[in-house]
Image (spheres, rainbow, N blue to C red):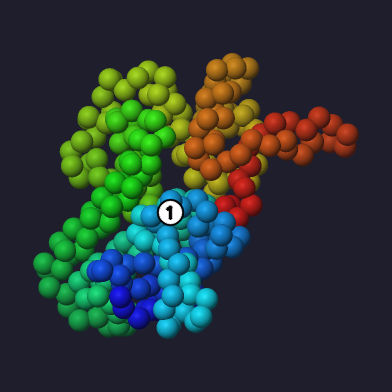
Amino acid sequence: MSMPMEFSFEGKGVRVVMIDGEPWWVAMDVAEVLGYKDTEAMTRRLDDDEKQNLRNVGFGNRGATIINEPGLYNAILGSHKAEAKRFKKWVTSEVLPALRRNGMYMVPSAQPDEVPAPLSARVEADEIVSAGRAFRSLFTTARYMGMPRKLAATRANLAAQRATGVDLAAELSASGWLESSDLPAPQQKQYEMQQQIRTLLQERDWPQDLTVALILQGIGRPDLVSDRATQILVGQCMLLLGYRRVRLPASRPNGIRPWGYRIPEGRG
């Protein structure tokens, strides 16, 4: 195990240790970068094998909670801060490739030396490896949730792409398999609806509160606002995207508080 290495992301310190050749990130530092309310708000969403408490001379007597690479991607997926996308890109394109090549992260110089051509291929390969690690963890989780293999693979690929920026299905020429018609019709409909809603939320910078009517209007289907099955489907999609169903404030004094969806505190 290495001593903690500290590097800076947009002025915030992030520490990492190498254990058996794999990077483990200090959860407190990651939680601050990703805008979580506190470290526990981030780590409680992680599986037990994605986190551990480490006692190291570099962390004082109490030690520190650290998270591995799959845990890091899950933490990134749970953050709706604009910094999350930049942090993900920085980790996968700069930090992880450097750690795997050298066992340490070196801040690029202001005038970097000319890089040999083979390096770009190695960096690209490292990014694909990182995406593969994220996919494996997410696919396993999806299967434990009871999803069929193809649906689990589709969801895991989308989540891994959001976390790492790499579309594994495209890299492996598997897009046709994932999008083929043998995916059960109800699950295919939910998958398509979720993609439409995710695009809407990203375009609007993940709004805090939303009603079903606003969501359907945003994706161009206001005609379905009274359809009970569609309301349920939208609710399922919003839960998968990290929102919770709550009573929203009334639009006027003493008015009826409508049901809607809100990002939990610490995740917005």
Residue 18 percent across, percent down from the top left:
31, 72
Number of numbered tags placed on the structure image? 1
* Residue drawn at 57 percent across, 30 percent down: 235
Q: Is residue 254 left or right of residue 111?
A: right
Q: Is residue 224 left or right of residue 92?
A: right
Residue 141 percent across, percent down from the top left:
38, 41
- Circle 1: residue type: Asp
Does dot 1 land on a helix, a strand or a loop?
A: helix
* Residue drawn at 35 percent across, 73 percent down: 17
Residue 172 percent across, percent down from the top left:
18, 42
* Residue drawn at 35 percent across, 64 percent down: 91
Q: Quadrant of residue 21?
A: bottom left
Location of residue 193 with respect to 43 vertically, above or below? above
**Residue situated in front as seen by the camera: 2 or 152:** 2
Residue 99 percent across, percent down from the top left:
27, 71
Q: Is residue 214 left or right of residue 174?
A: right
**Residue situated in front as seen by the camera: 136 or 180:** 136
> Is residue 260 visible to us here?
yes
**Residue situated in front as seen by the camera: 136 or 173:** 136
* Residue drawn at 44 percent across, 26 percent down: 190
Circle 1 sits on which residue? 48
Q: Is residue 85 left or right of residue 165?
A: right
Q: Quadrant of residue 114?
A: bottom left
